[in-house]
Image (cartoon, helix red, strand yellow):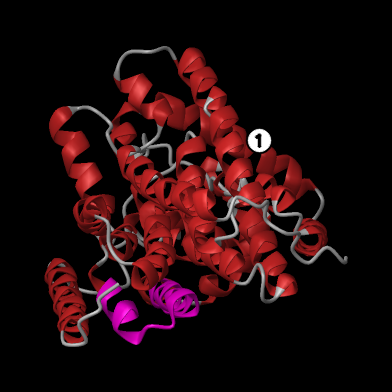
């Protein structure tokens, strides 16, 4: 990305500087708490309570309580006041996610929150390294706001972005590892809707087989450990979550999707969801087209990451960590072939987009968050089309032996 060797250390120092500022601001926020076992006001990493409480209940033998509002309220009340009239939401993820969360339930809330973030950060930075093999770029990406919004919100965007990034990075090198990553991503299925389209178009049959086996193994393991009824509770809880999110106007500024854009514009929930689902058709055609014809897996991965953020109705600002993965894949191509002037304008915006989209949408009461993935997808498709003019042959099959 940077041809001038002198600029690389400066970029790394910039990343470190932003990292230090973010940590300092977070510590300043923590200074209001008298202790870190009980929090009279807002919880640090507030969304993490929806992860810690289910994880804690697993060790009390009440895994199904993750999908029961009174049980969630009772567990959260052990670390912060819960008014009697407040009905806390349940966990929004399938029961397989409990397998991942359970270890964090052994820790006290604040420690679990920090460990959860640091593990996600380590995985995210490792994924950037696997994609780019550039130490300066990995350090520079500490300025990416998608990292710090996950710390403040206590969310899992770094994990899901990393699994998608590793899956695409290892697709041609290690199909078993790629399939494992995509299989684990089924714990947050809404971000993997178009991955099967990409894998079928690339004819990556071995990756598909491994991913399917991993997903099935997680399904069975969750039923064995937590009991088969957990899936009845889980499906009911996820259905309730979808309904609640479709009605929660206060959250739409944090949901940068076409669905929330239309809801903020006054479109009814049913019509907004129908139009959102119709968006799957053109996005699927684009993803299939690039993986079927383009030989450049880096650019194909950029398109797939952006499309994943565009097709799901319930994508939050913290899920925009996936833009950081797309940026890494695009950075590899920029380092090889140079910049286009449009990229010099868009890519700095992508760095701040996860936080900026929240602020912009709040100020305008208009959801503009989907423009970030759209712009980045445009940059990747532009490069793909230029390459296809030179080498228009279809992409060869990947790992066709199962």
- Seen in the picture, residue 72 relative to 135 is either above or below; the reply is above
Q: Nearer the viewer, residue 121 or 199?
A: 199
Q: Please tell me which residue is depicted at 45% across the width and 77% down the height of the picture.
A: 119
Q: Residues within 10 Å of mark 1 (few under 14, many from 20)?
A: some
Q: Quadrant of the N terminus?
A: bottom left
Query: In the visual, does 287 lie left or right of 180?
Result: left
* Secondary structure of residue under mark 1: helix
User: Eyeballing the image, is 170 above or below 6?
Assistant: above
Majority secondary structure of the magenta segment? helix
Q: Is residue 291 visible?
A: yes
- 288 or 20, nearer to the observer: 288
User: Which residues are the magenta region?
Assistant: 117-141
Give the x, y percent position of residue 163. Answer: 56, 65
**Which residue position is annotated with label 1?**
236
Q: Is residue 106 left or right of residue 397?
A: left
Q: Residue at x 82, y 60 (%)?
A: 209
Q: Is residue 249 above or below residue 370?
A: above
């Amino acid at each position: 990305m940077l041809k001038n060797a002198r600029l690389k250390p400066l970029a790394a120092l910039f990343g470190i500087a932003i990292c230090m500022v973010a940590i300092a601001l977070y510590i300043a926020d923590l200074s209001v708490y008298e202790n870190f076992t009980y929090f009279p006001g807002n919880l640090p990493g507030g969304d993490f309570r929806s992860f810690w409480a289910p994880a804690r209940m697993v060790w009390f033998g009440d895994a199904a309580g993750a999908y029961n509002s009174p049980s969630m309220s009772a567990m959260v009340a052990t670390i912060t006041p819960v008014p009697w009239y407040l009905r806390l939401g349940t966990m929004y993820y399938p029961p397989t996610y409990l397998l991942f969360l359970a270890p964090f339930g052994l820790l006290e809330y604040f420690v679990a929150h920090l460990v959860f973030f640091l593990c996600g950060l380590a995985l995210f930075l490792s994924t950037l390294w696997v994609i780019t093999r550039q130490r300066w770029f990995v350090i520079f990406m500490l300025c990416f706001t998608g990292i710090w919004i996950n710390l403040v919100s206590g969310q899992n965007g770094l994990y899901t972005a990393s699994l998608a990034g590793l899956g695409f990075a290892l697709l041609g090198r290690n199909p078993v590892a790629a399939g494992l990553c995509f299989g684990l991503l089924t714990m947050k299925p809404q971000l993997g809707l178009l991955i099967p389209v990409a894998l079928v178009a690339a004819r990556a049959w071995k990756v598909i087989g491994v991913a399917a086996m991993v997903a099935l193994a997680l399904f069975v393991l969750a039923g064995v450990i937590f009991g088969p009824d957990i899936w009845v509770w889980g499906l009911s809880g996820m259905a309730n979550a979808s309904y609640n999110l479709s009605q929660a106007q206060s959250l739409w500024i944090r949901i940068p999707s076409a669905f929330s854009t239309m809801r903020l514009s006054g479109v009814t929930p049913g019509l907004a969801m129908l139009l959102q689902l119709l968006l799957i058709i053109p996005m699927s055609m684009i993803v299939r087209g690039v993986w079927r014809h383009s030989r450049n897996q880096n650019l194909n991965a950029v398109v797939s990451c952006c499309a994943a953020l565009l097709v799901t109705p319930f994508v939050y600002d913290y899920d925009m960590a996936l833009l950081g993965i797309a940026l890494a894949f695009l950075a590899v191509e920029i380092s090889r072939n140079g910049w286009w002037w449009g990229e010099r304008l868009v890519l700095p915006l992508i760095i701040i987009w996860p936080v900026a989209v929240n602020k912009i949408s709040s100020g305008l009461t208009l959801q503009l968050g989907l423009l970030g993935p759209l712009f980045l997808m445009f940059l990747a498709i532009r490069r793909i089309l230029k390459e296809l003019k030179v080498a228009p042959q279809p992409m060869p099959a990947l790992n066709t032996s199962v």
